[in-house]
Amino acid sequence: MLLFPLYASVRAIETPSTLDDQQWLTYWILYSFITLFELSCWQILAWVPFWSYMKLLFCLWLVLPIFNGAAYIYDHFVRKYVKIGGTVSSSYPESQRKVLLMMTPDARRSVEYYISKHGPEAFERVVKAAEKEARKR
């Protein structure tokens, strides 16, 4: 279960899209957890019938593009419970805090710099303009 994921991971690094990067990073994290679990519980798993077949089927589900299992687990489980950079200063109004929380940490830093340079009113105008533009579509 290593040859195709290795090849696909190298190929994903070379593409500009981040979707395939997410798929393969998630795969390697889950595969590491499975391996760690297996190494930690090997004495118990030795008694589980068909463990190796269950592991093989799970890894195939994670790897095969038709299933995109790793991306599914990331979207439905990991993203809900793991928030990276999920804190925003309480000095911002609630509407601005909600917008800032939806951003990546890099985008948040850029917006915070914009607010410090132009003021919170300018940011509020940008948010309202974006909401108005979104309603048009």
Image (spheres, rainbow, N blue to C red):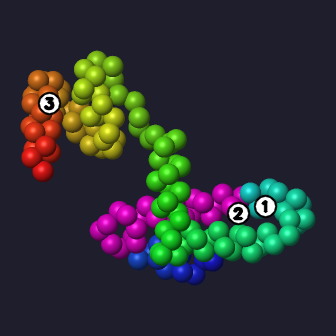
Q: Residues within 10 Å of mark 1 (few under 14, many from 20)?
A: few
Residue 26 within the segment the image draws in magenta:
yes
Q: CA gap, disc 1 to disc 3?
A: 51 Å
**Amino acid type, callout 3:** Phe
Which range of residues does the magenta coloring cover? Answer: 12-36
Residue linked to disc 2: 35
Horizontal relation, residue 49 to residue 23: left or right: right
What crowding class fits label 2: few (fewer than 14 Cα within 10 Å), some (14-19), or many (20 or more)? few
Does any portion of residue 123 appear in the rendered image?
yes
Q: Position of residue 34 (x, y in %)?
A: 69, 61
Q: Is residue 25 visible?
A: no
Q: CA distance from mark 2 to mark 1?
A: 6 Å
What crowding class fits label 3: few (fewer than 14 Cα within 10 Å), some (14-19), or many (20 or more)? Answer: some
Residue at point 10%, 39% (across, down): 132
* Residue type (three-letter) at the residue carrying disc 1: Leu
- Cβ–Cβ below 8 Å for labels 2 and 1? yes
- Dot 1: element: helix
Q: Position of residue 57 (x, y in %)?
A: 66, 73
Q: Is residue 87 above or below residue 30?
A: above
* Amino acid type of the residue that numbered disc 2 sits on in the rendered structure: Thr
| Circles 1 and 3: CB atoms closer than 8 Å | no
Residue identifier under label 1: 39
Q: Residue 74's spot in the image, x, y percent?
A: 50, 55
Reply above or below: 27 against 102.
Answer: below
Does 8 lie within the magenta span? Answer: no
Q: Quadrant of residue 115?
A: top left
Identify the element where label 3 is drawn. helix
Who is closer to the viewer here, 99 or 9?
Answer: 99
81 lies left or right of 2: left
In primary-sequence order, the first of circles 2 and 3 is: 2
Residue named by callout 3: 123
